[in-house]
Image: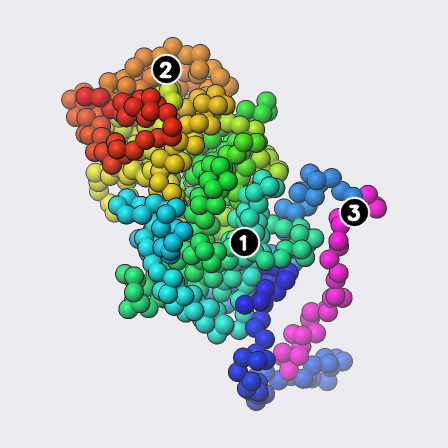
Amino acid sequence: MASNGVGNGEFSFDNKGRTGLPKIQTQKTEENVVCHDDSATPVKAQTLDELHSLQKKKSAPTTPIKSPRVFGVAVSEEERQKQQLQSPLHKLLELYEQAIKYEKGSFITSSGALATLSGAKTGRSPRDKRVVRDETTEEDLWWGKGSPNIEMDEQTFLINRERAVDYLCSLEKVFVNDQFLNWDPNNRIKVRIVSARAYHSLFMHNMCIRPTPEELEDFGTPDFTIYNAGQFPCNRYTHYMTSSTSIDINLARREMVILGTQYAGEMKKGLFGVMHYLMPKRQILSLHSGCNMGKEGDVALFFGLSGTGKTTLSTDHNRYLIGDDEHCWSNHGVSNIEGGCYAKCIDLSREKEPDIWNAIKFGTVLENVVFEEHTREVDYTDKSVTENTRAAYPIEYIPNAKIPCVGPHPKNVILLACDAFGVLPPVSKLNLAQTMYHFISGYTALVAGTEDGIKEPTATFSACFGAAFIMLHPTKYAAMLAEKMQKHGATGWLVNTGWSGGSYGSGSRIKLAYTRRIIDAIHSGALLKAEYKKTEVFGLEIPTELEGVPSEILDPVNTWPDKKAHKDTLLKLGGLFRKNFEVFTNYKIGTDSKLTEEILAAGPNF
Ligand SMILES: Nc1ncnc2c1ncn2[C@@H]1O[C@H](COP(=O)(O)OP(=O)(O)OP(=O)(O)O)[C@@H](O)[C@H]1O
Ligand SMILES: O=C([O-])CC(=O)C(=O)O
Ligand SMILES: [Ca+2]
Ligand SMILES: [Mn+2]
């Protein structure tokens, strides 16, 4: 399939050579004829189509500028990267128009963002992900129990690929995005995304790194291609298929096929999976984390499962945003993989999250939100379509984004857990073994769904805080993280952004303002100097005081009216951690046996 060569634009398949059939001539209908009256000079059009064609002035063919120059002086690398981020207005307008015209549920909201619907799927479908198992991946990848890589064979991949390509070819137009991943210039990956919806094209335009016109001209062959035929289902009778949705990755062919889901996050996270394979091969660690940097150049990573606060907490008005979700840590420091952010919007407020609020403007894709039909004001509290409402915007929509999105080695590694059991402390300082224990465990406990009534929280353990995206065994990433943290002297922290004063139902979620004070104290170094005490069961070091946070909440036991219930819940969670970790007890983490033993001993003790 050919690319349009300009990227992000619309693209029409040329029918020549495909069917050889002549174009069907349609009759001019009465209603299509322009009505002429004699009171004014008649328009030069006979039909409405002709009239519409007059509206658009033909632009002269443009030759892409070879080298960006200002008054004959070559622009600096920094300037070039700034230019690269700015989306040409016409490109955005075109995608808006295409979405509004052809995709039901697309509207412009009062702030100028494009509201879209992702269809039946409003979240990812990890059970429908398949990875081709061949000679290479057989050896390299993590397969079997606990692994996110569910196998498929090459033949089945080709069947689904053909199905997707045939579907895309049957359309009048498709969208082609040629973009980059990874701000580290030495490890940049070229990606091509072929999709059928303007929504998908605008989403990826915002989320991946946008090339300059010059880079686009010299784009060449992509390193990886996505065929997104999400509107069209897979055939459930095809081998390996268990539903009408299939997200298929073939590393040897460097291709991904999407059938039966229009949730745009599949493209973003599918490519993230590919990076989790490609980067470790180059001794670069890929991370499901947010990342920001202070004025003094101190970098922090924020790990955590979905909804724990990576985007919310890395978007900090007092710090430079490097990225909100996907990063690489190489021998040279950190780099963002993406060119945009993907924020959760449920209950979004201007007061609590001003930078995200202000980023929701013209160019931003708003997924599955509900808005007032006349004023087009979005009601962020409305979960009618889904609780997973989202905004995808280019990173430069955040005023203090760090462009280029790279930084030095991290000083702090913050592990976020939204503990709906309400027993993990709001903050604890971790030693290296504890950091690794919690990184491998990848715990959170959200209360799922929109159902009314009190529900039991359910614990989720997702290795490396991203089991759905990793390709290799979790201990491979863990060993790399341990090595890097040790080498660069980074401190680990566990921050509970979840419940306090009891479990979900009796307690409440810790105030974002308090979590922000905790994070501030980590960044400033103040927390490192605090006085600590050790908790029962988890053996976590917790500070006794922290500026701006009531001291009594620092130890969860103080906030529970029923002490017995607290102890029971603490033991229950400890048991869940222990059970989850059983599968890792036979693995060695890196080459240091002492560290492996320490990690095994760093879990709950009771
Ligand atoms: N104390 C708190 N700390 C952090 N976030 C909080 C807190 N209280 C409420 N929240 C809310 O929790 C949500 C955190 O979601 P966020 O978008 O940061 O998740 P994420 O970790 O980036 O997930 P994903 O990987 O799915 O993008 C936001 O909606 C935020 O407003
Ligand atoms: O991928 C998504 O749909 C959203 C996200 O960031 C995650 O789940 O980690
Ligand atoms: Ca996020
Ligand atoms: Mn994420």
Check disc 2 and report the residue beneath it. Answer: 543
Q: Is residue 223 above or below residue 15?
A: above
Label 1 CB-ligand 2 distance < 8 A: no
Dot 2: what SS? strand
For numbered disc 3, what is the local secondary structure? strand
Estimate the x, y position of residue 289 in percent, counting from the top left: 45, 36
Applied colour scheme: rainbow
If you read the primary sequence from the N terminus, does the residue marked by circle 3 or circle 1 appear first? 3
Label 2 amino acid? Pro
Mark 2 or mark 1, whichever is nearer to me: 1
Q: Residue at x 24, y 27 (%)?
A: 502
- Label 3 – label 2 distance at C-alpha: 54 Å
Q: Is residue 78 left or right of residue 421?
A: right
Residue under pointer 3? 69
Count up the numbered dots. 3
What residue range appears in magenta? Answer: 47-73
State the quadrant of the C terminus.
top left
Relative to 283, is 433 on the left or the right? left
CA separation in Å, label 2 and label 1: 48 Å
Task: Please give the label number shown on residue 304.
Answer: none
Q: Position of residue 389 (x, y in %)?
A: 41, 48
Q: Residues within 10 Å of mark 2 (few under 14, many from 20)?
A: many
Please indicate whether residue 108 sits to the left or right of residue 91 in the image: left
| Image depth: mark 3 or mark 2 in front | 3
Residue located 50% across and 62% down the image: 195
Report helix, strand or loop for mark 1.
loop
Instruction: Examine the rendered structure and indicate whether residue 259 appears above or below residue 69.
Output: below
Quadrant assignment for the N terminus = bottom right
| Camera sees residue 67 | yes
Q: Nearer the viewer, residue 193 or 548?
A: 193
Which amino acid, mark 3? Arg
